[in-house]
Each structure stands twice: as structure tokens, then as C-alpha cells.
Image (cartoon, rainbow, N blue to C red):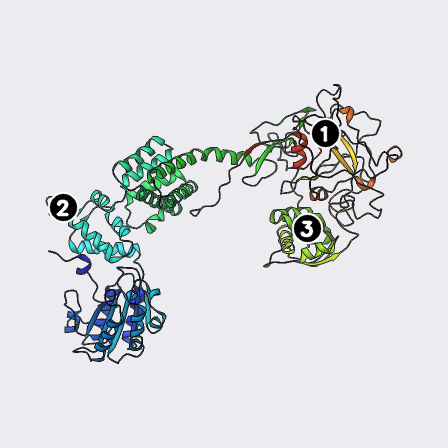
Amino acid sequence: MTTALYRRYRPESFGEMIGQSQVTEPLMTALRSDRVGHAYLFSGPRGCGKTTSARILARCLNCAEGPTDTPCGTCESCVELGRGGGGSLDVVEIDAASHNGVDDARDLRERAVFAPARDRFKIFILDEAHMVTPQGFNALLKLVEEPPEHVKFIFATTEPEKVIGTIRSRTHHYPFRLVPPAAMLEYVEQLCAQEGVEVEQGVLPLVVRAGGGSPRDTLSLLDQLIAGSDPTAGTGALTVRYARAVALLGYTHAELLDEVVDAFAASDASAAFGAVDRVVQTGQDPRRFVDDLLERLRDLIVVAATGQDAAAVLRGVSADDLTRMRRQADAFGAARLSRIADLVVGTLDDMTGATSPRLQLELMVARVLARGTDAAPAAATASAGATAATPASAGAPVAAAASAGAPGTAGGSPVGPVEGASLRRPEQAAPAAGSPPIPPADAPPPLPAGPVTVERMKDAWPRVLGRLEEISRSSWMLASGARILALDGDVLTLAFTSQTDVGKFKHLAAGKGPSEDLRQAILAELGIRVKYIARHDPAGGPGGPGDPRGPGGAGGPGAGDSGAPEVPAPASPGGRADVRPVPPAPDHAPPSRDAPVATTPRASASPRASGGGHSAPAAAAPVTEWAVAPIPSDADAPPPDPGPAAFPVVAAGQLAVDDEPEDAAATAPSRVATLAPAREGDVLPPSEVAPSIESDDDADETDVDAVDAVVDPPVPPTVAPPLAPALRTRNGGVQRYGEAVVRQVLGARFVREEPYEPPTRFS
């Protein structure tokens, strides 16, 4: 018969304890300075040394040379409380699980009255103290609070929260913890050397992992493996085999894990499902296999992240194993490893309580293999999307439409969009060989150096709004209606058209709000952190004096700049395009067949679109809206009968309102135009679309914010017309429209949705 390892190697002093320095060092200091308390509470997981520490403390207190932090080991008290000792009369160990009532507490009080038989103190060690009932604790309360001078109490428990507060408050509480794997691995290596036992590579890491940080559980498992090992031929020494350790502890063999990992790397479905079948046929637990696979993926992630320094993190792994792991990690890459690890973690969670763990395991393998085959197309898609004219957020749908980023016309010949092709504008075409690179047309102009002035602020205002739109859409809508009045140092004065907007701009919730969002956008664009003065100016607003986006502002041409085709403004970072109609040709010019778009002016009732900054009243100068309809290729075909259910065609969500009397159409053709009929599923022919009519000076530009701020009116469902060529004006310039107009008028269709991969817990 042999004694168990955890009993033969039980520590006899605080210096022999491993992994519990947070307990041993304060206790040794208290013993050296003679400041020992009368009651202690040791708590922590099972098998981490609570009862052993209580016995060591009793040896230190009752040692003939004590109280001391290092027992002599030779006196009667030290021998009786040592590994082979039978116990001391003055040290009473009580199992609280079977002595937890009031009667047991009364008996303990009677025993505590008597002085120790031989030693310095009478020490009571209550193991599993959480099993004592509240009544039993209350019966002990007076004794624990004011014990005799010769009495010491040591409570040991795995659940300190079940010890009543009145007892805990009268003790010195020392929490024990699980031993770290590195310290435990070093300890079992020394123990095997002392026992003369040989172990194969990889056995001790499995033992330490199975022990879970508990020294007693780890030594029990190692004792079991040693007892079941055969002596080596020739030397006669016991050798613990890796295969037997794997079979006994229930872990997956490293060769099987390597086979599965290699199958995942090569996307070999046959090898992967063959390994899964072998796991099931050998009787292994699928949950244990998934847990082991997750452990291997963790090791590969560490190897991929640390490189040559992985040995310092993965202790106990041989050099050959590290070389093999580096090869496997290089085959995957850190990003793919983290995605696979997420799938394995999700499967492990789903297996809890699952009725068919094998099915969950096979589905996990299928998902991993499918994710591996999708990695290359996803990377190619991301690379192709990087050349697109307008950046889109991950997961946003990409529409193949002839808009600002759609293929344009070359030499007067329309070029239709091609599915899967990169959407590149003509001005962004690659330069010829040997020529200097041409900057993209929508690149912002470089900011001038020097202090930030009000003019520089107005010049940069469109880009500031673009940054603000990325931060907060609601803050962008509010700031779009503001007008820059002055900039004095870092104090920016803004004017709003309503007092409500002023209040919303000043409102802050937990330090967040429109003003703070705008401040961050200005800081990112101009490098200045501003303060605000928000004023209510009913006469101002977008389009007024000083507005960088309206007539006379820093961002666009004035009212007198008519006659040349207007250059399209760059799209904002949020994907919005500036809608700016080009002045039409003279009224006597017939509509050209080359122009694929006909426009019909409408009188708008929107006060924002009327340019509130002008002195003329809104009723006297309504803003012309443009109704857009594509022209079919056969313009000479007779128009179909519109029928009685005709409805007006409107653009960009603005409802055209005809508030003029009927006889005013003849006297003021520039103000009112006949509503163009529209039929469900048909396209307006040229004969039914009125030519562009010259508008007044107040409407030579359309405010994009006013267009987007109005909700689309309900219209009857229509069948999208065939895709038209790129929109051009009479003067040859490219006409820009918002995404909604492109989808509705041009019949744009959904091509694909880019996958969005959120960050994982491993990357």
C-alpha cells in the first residue's frame, strides 16, 4: 500500500506553498511581528491549500520556538501536526458538515473554556464552515467575538458568502486562489523527478489542464497515471505514456487535432468529416472534442500573434510542436483563425443541453469549411470595392445605376452599367502611361495654411458637414440649416432660422449633442476647437448671405453666373449628391434626341427651397422644381393614351404645387407648367414632356438639403422603366441626382450586398 501523492507531498511550512503568496506572506509577517489575530477565515476553491494552511498556522503558533513563521519540525507539536503525525490534543479539527447545529456549538463552547493540555494555544479548525447553520453560528458568536486568551479559531470554506456577516466581520479573511498553470507545471515536474517517474512529452500539460489549478486534484490525477503505467524495459523506471494519458483523461489526441486543423486550412471536407466520424466512433464526447479544438485554436492565435516569442506563453510545449503550430498558423492567418474560433465558441455554447451533440459538431465543421471557401471571394470583392468612386459602408447595398458614380458616355455613345464592374466615373479613369497622376474630381481642395478665418471656415463648411454626417445624421440635418455669421478667434457665431433649432443645437445629454458633434467635425477638418454663439435669425438660413452652399456664398457661384454649364459638386462622404439643374437652352430650340432626359419646371411651395436669404418675398418668386422622365429610344412613336388616372411626376421627394390661377399660365409661362401625365409602367414620350423653361434668378440653384428634408409623397406603384443612359444636360454637362431619384427614374436595381464582418473576441 502507498500513500497518495497529495498526502506525501503536503506542505509543512508556508515556504512550501505554491501559488498562494497573497496569503502566506501576510501571515508570516504577522507571525514575525507577534500580531496574530484570534480568528481567521480561509476561503477559496477546493484543493488549493486552505486546510493545509490552517495546520501550518497551528504549527507556527504552537511550535516550541514560536510563535514563528517557520516551524522547527522537531518539537512534539510540529511532529504531531506534520505529514505523518496523528494530530494534537490542543488542535481540534471539526467537520462542520456533520457538526453544524446549536448543540455542537454549545459543546464547542464548553471545550473552549479549558486551557490547552500542553501547547501554547487551543486551536479550533472548522472545515467546510459554510455548512454551519445560522443558529449554530449565532450560538458561536459570543465565543468568536470575545474568546479566551488561549483560544484561536480558523474557519475554512469554499463559499464564504454563506458564513453569516457577524462571524465574517470578526475574522481576518484570506482568499485563496487556483494555482497558475506555469507554477503548477514546474511543481509536478519536480515531483516526478523526485519520484523517479518518466513522462512522455505532452503528458504533464494535460495533467495540469485537467487539474484546473487545484494542487490536490492535479496530484490525484498524476498519481492515477503513475499507478497505471508500466515500467520501461531495461531501466525498470515507470513511464507515463501520452496515449494512455489521453485515453484516461478523456482529451483528444494531438494527432487528431492536427488532422482537423490541417483539413480546415486546406478546406478538405472529406478529411474534416472523417476526423469527426473517428471522434464519434471512438466514443469520445463531442463537447470535449470541441473544447480541445478551441484550445488548439487559441494556441494557434497566440503563435500567430507572438511569433518567435510563443514559447514564453505556451509553456510545456516542445519545440517540434511549436514549429508545427507556426506552420498551421501561417496557413490560416490571424483574421481567419479568429473567425473560426468564434464559430467554435458558438457551437460550444449551443452544445449545452443539446440532444444531438454530433449534429452540432458536424454543422460546425460545415460552417467552418463554408467560411473558408468564402474568404477568397470576400477579399476579392473588398479589393474591387476599394476602386469605387464613392466609398460605401460595410454591409450597404451597391446599386448599379447611371448616377454620379455610374459609367458615363464616351463620344456621345451611352455606356450602360455592367454587373460586377467597378463603378468609376469618367474623370477618375486611370492616366495614360508616362503621364502624371490625375487627382480625382471629388478630392477636396487643399486647405490654406495660416489661422482659421471666417472665409476659411465658409470654404471648409461643406467638408465639415460631410464629416458631421458621418458622426450623426440628426446633427448634420440641424447644422445644414445654420448660417455662419462670424468667427472671432475660436468663437463661432451661427444663425438658425427658428428658435427651436437653436434649442436643439444647445441641448446636451451626457455630454453629447449637435453642438459637440459639430465641434468634433470642425476639429477634425480645421484643427480648431470652437465655442459657439447660436442666434435666432428668421431672415437667414441656407442660401442666404454668408451661406457657403447658397448663392453668393463661398461654396457656389452667384446668381449672375449663368450661361456656362454648372460643374457638378462632389458627393458628400455619406453618399449624397448635390442636385444642381443647369440653365436650359433657349425656348425655340427643339428637344434633342441625344438628350435622354426632359425636364418640366414646377412651382414649389417649400420655403427652404425658395432661398430664404433673398429680399424678394417667397410668393413672388417660387422656386422651379424639375420633374425628370427618361425618353425612350423611339421618340417618333405615337404616345399612348394617358387615361384618366394621370398623376404629376415629381423629383427628389418635392411635391409640385400649382397655386396660380388658370389664366396665369398664359401670361406667366416661366412660373407655371402643364403637369406631365404619367401612366403605370410607361415612359413619357418627348411630345408629352414640356421643354425646360427659363426660371428666375431666385431658382437657378436647388438646395439639396431642402430636397432631402421633405418626405416623399405617396405615389401610385409603378413599374420601373428600362435603364436609361447617363443623364446629360443640353449643354453636355453631367446632371447629378440623389440616390432616390436614380432608383425611381432610371430603374436602378440591386446588385449585391457586401458582407459585414464584425470584430471578434480574438481580433
- At label 2, counting other C-alpha atoms closer than 10 Å, the crowd grade (few under 14, some 14-19, many 20 or more) is few
Q: Residue at the spot x=69%, y=57% of the render?
A: 503
User: Would you say 203 lies left or right of 759 here?
Assistant: left
Residues at discs 3 and 2 in contact (Cβ within 8 Å) = no
Residues at discs 3 and 1 in contact (Cβ within 8 Å) = no
Above or below for 322 versus 582 = below
- At label 3, counting other C-alpha atoms closer than 10 Å, the crowd grade (few under 14, some 14-19, many 20 or more) is some
Q: Is residue 597 magenta?
A: no
Q: Residue type at mark 1?
A: Ala
Element at badge 1? strand
Q: Position of residue 725 (x, y in %)?
A: 67, 27
Residue highlighted by disc 3: 478
Q: Which portion, as a residue range, is magenta?
A: 96-100
User: Would you say 221 lies left or right of 383 here?
Assistant: left
Q: Position of residue 407 (x, y in %)?
A: 63, 29
Q: Position of residue 736 (x, y in %)?
A: 70, 35
Q: Position of residue 744 (x, y in %)?
A: 66, 33
- At label 1, counting other C-alpha atoms closer than 10 Å, the crowd grade (few under 14, some 14-19, many 20 or more) is many
The secondary structure that dominates the magenta segment is loop
Q: Residue type at mark 2?
A: Asp
Q: Is residue 80 or residue 13 the one in the foreground?
A: 80
Above or below for 10 versus 635 = below
Q: In the picture, which quadrant includes the N terminus? A: bottom left
Q: How far apart are the two marked residues, 1 and 2, measured between alpha carbons?
A: 90 Å
Residue highlighted by disc 2: 230
Q: How far apart are the two marked residues, 3 and 2, measured between alpha carbons?
A: 81 Å
Residue 485 visible here: no
Q: Is residue 49 or residue 181 the one in the foreground?
A: 49
Residue highlighted by disc 1: 629
Q: Residue type at mark 3?
A: Leu
Element at badge 2? loop
Extreme-top residue of the structure = 637
